[in-house]
Image: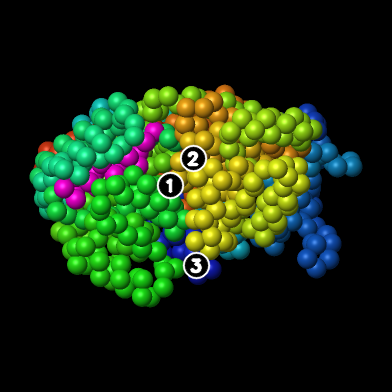
Amino acid sequence: MKLIELPNLSSKRLQALQKSGIHTPNDLLMLFPRRYIDKSVVKPIAFLTEGTGPVTVTGKVISKNVIGFKQKKRLEVIIQDKTGSLKAVFFKGWRYFITQFTENNWVALYGPVKRYGNYYSMAHPEVDPIESPDDVKKYDTLIPIYPGNKHFSKAYITNSIIKDWITQILSGKEIPEFLPRDVLSRHNFPERKDALNIIHQPVSLKDAQTALERFKYEEFFLFELSMASIKKQRTERAKGKMLKPGKYTSTFFNEVLPFTLTDGQKHALSDIRTDLQSGNQMNRLIQGDVGAGKTVVAIGAMLMAIDNGMQAALMAPTEILAEQHYQTIKQYIEPLGLNFRLLTGGQKTALRRDILTDIEGGNCNIVVGTHAIFQEKVKFHNLGLAVIDEQHRFGVKQRNDVLMKGDNPHLLVMSATPIPRSLAMTIYSDLDISVITGLPAGRKPIKTAVRTDKERQKVYDFLEQSIQNGDQAYVVFPLIEESEVMDLKDATMGFEKLKRRFPDFSISLLHGRMKSDEKEQIMKRFVDGETQILVSTTVIEVGVDVPNASIMIIEHAERFGLSQLHQLRGRIGRGSKQSYCILMPDVKLSKSGRYRLKKMVDTNDGFEIAESDLKLRGPGDFLGTKQSGLPEFRHGDIVEDRLLLEQSKNDAWNIIKTDPGLEKTEHKELKKVFEPYFKERSEFFGVG
């Protein structure tokens, strides 16, 4: 059956379906109800009360009138049963609805009830023509309510029309099953055709939920099958250079590094060493909380590449972060006498040419920069290891771009934002994962408190006393892109107020609009202890360690996301001193604002905070960008449905392990569905 064969499908309706992404009967079948209603509760009109509903009433059409002028016209219909009268009112689309009513014919109306003047009333009820009051007995099942949109409403595609179309498609369409039989049996899922019938014509909500779970699993399963296939192909295609730690690695950890590694760092380095010596291309994610010491682990991995005569590269999502990484690496490995360069877009032509020559000639051991370092113009002499920081801002495609650079370099990705297991499983399922737990020895948990503007004087007194005792402090103002000018003014005014309040202290202002060298000088003065209070926008969210900075005041704290607050707080507590984070919200706080601030006070655990933030904002907003690598699931939610996600991953990866080409008889139908699915998303996955 083709879409154009559906009854009552005018060219206008066909166009509306296509604009809504519905091009085939199967697309229409996958338009699932957003909710179900129960029309079986029928009440006589006289028994209605204000606020009743939603409820079904039946009656004979007594009158229908179009009232009002021009754009303000509305349709009013009076129906009557043995006990009384009710008015139905329609505003938008009244020209269509007037055709649904014929005087002296019976109708059933469904909707919430209100009282206006002498009449009980329903606004835009659902309308069903019926032969007689007894005809409502057909409402013995749940009624699916489909999602509407502006295209549907313009073409008068109503819920009942969609329902009729889907019923017709289901009655005449062959719907093959593609999930393997053992999967259906293991999870007690209905077959695909049965599940679609249940979704669109359920007897009970429980049945509908079971059928929906099958389709949530199905889309998770196809995605995980793709990730497993990518990893399998990559492992077979790319044999990585075998790298062993040598002189530079040994000198760094035994002589240069001023502290002892934590158990978490040692485990992560052990995983990396195993990967690099395996002969296969490493694809590993290092995940850890703020301050867990991921950068030191990455430096160790890069030195292993250099020990074997190869180059290493570190990619950050922004120039600011790239510059800060460059300074951190410089601080740690300068004593080793290695050549490391910073490559960013804002550099002068002569300097850039010099850096590119250094990289291509093999003079440069480590290059730090943004995604530009993996573009075609940058030619590596012998790239052995690529490190991607803030991995959640890049997708699967970006990872594959890096892996195709040069001669199969090893890949290490890091996430400075703790990401809950359910999310990591989804977007990083083609990677091996190492989690660094715990904080370096000697560090104390940061104490966090919320203080109001009325308590500002006490906060400043505490700040003054702390600085007199030799501490340093951050005062952070929000910088929201949409109101950048206003926010910058806010930070500048705050800077001027602090200078007046603390005339004897050295105070600096740092923001993203400053030139790179100016920002570097300001940050260096703070690192060196020359600046006592650094007033900043969120450019310090991820930056160099300042162990002496033990106080952070966050202004307008309610305007920050939960994970962002945690990232900011992670700039302090880097030394052995007790550190304090003071959240200063505005007077008016929303419910979610209060929740975020309370969560910050209650815990320092970044993974717990990330879990809460993910629930608050949803996966898309949590990751912040479309390039995040997060697939769009139509029915499944990776937070709410994490158990299904885990089950689908296990099943998919087991199948690819035993039958990578899906050649077995039991996978014949699966292969037919999977191949076009994978091809359609090849750009997302960075293959093909």
Indicate the secondary structure of the residue bearing disc 3: helix
Q: Residues within 10 Å of mark 3 (few under 14, many from 20)?
A: some
Q: Which residue was labeled with disc 1? A: 634
Dominant SS in magenta: helix
Q: In the rendered structure, does residue 80 fall within the stretch colored magenta?
A: no
The spot of residue 654 in percent (x, y) is 18, 35
Look at the picture and state if 308 lies above or below 217: below
Q: CB atoms at circles 1 and 2 under 8 Å apart?
A: no
Q: Residue at x 75, y 34 (%)?
A: 456
Q: Which residue was labeled with disc 3? A: 15
Q: Which residues are magenta?
A: 292-307
- Which amino acid lies under the numbered mark 2 shown in the image of this protein? Val
- Which amino acid lies under the numbered mark 3 shown in the image of this protein? Gln
Q: Which residue was labeled with disc 2? A: 546
Q: Nearer the viewer, residue 357 or 333?
A: 333
- Which amino acid lies under the numbered mark 1 shown in the image of this protein? Arg
Asked where in the image residue 553 lies, by quadrant, the reply is top right
Counting residues from the start of the chain, the first of labels 1 and 2 encountered is 2
**Mark 3 or 1: the one toward you:** 1
The spot of residue 68 in percent (x, y) is 84, 62
- Taking 619 as reference, is 408 left or right? left
Q: CA distance from mark 1 to mark 2?
A: 44 Å
- Taking 143 as reference, is 485 left or right? right
Q: Nearer the viewer, residue 87 or 22?
A: 22
Indicate the secondary structure of the residue bearing disc 2: loop
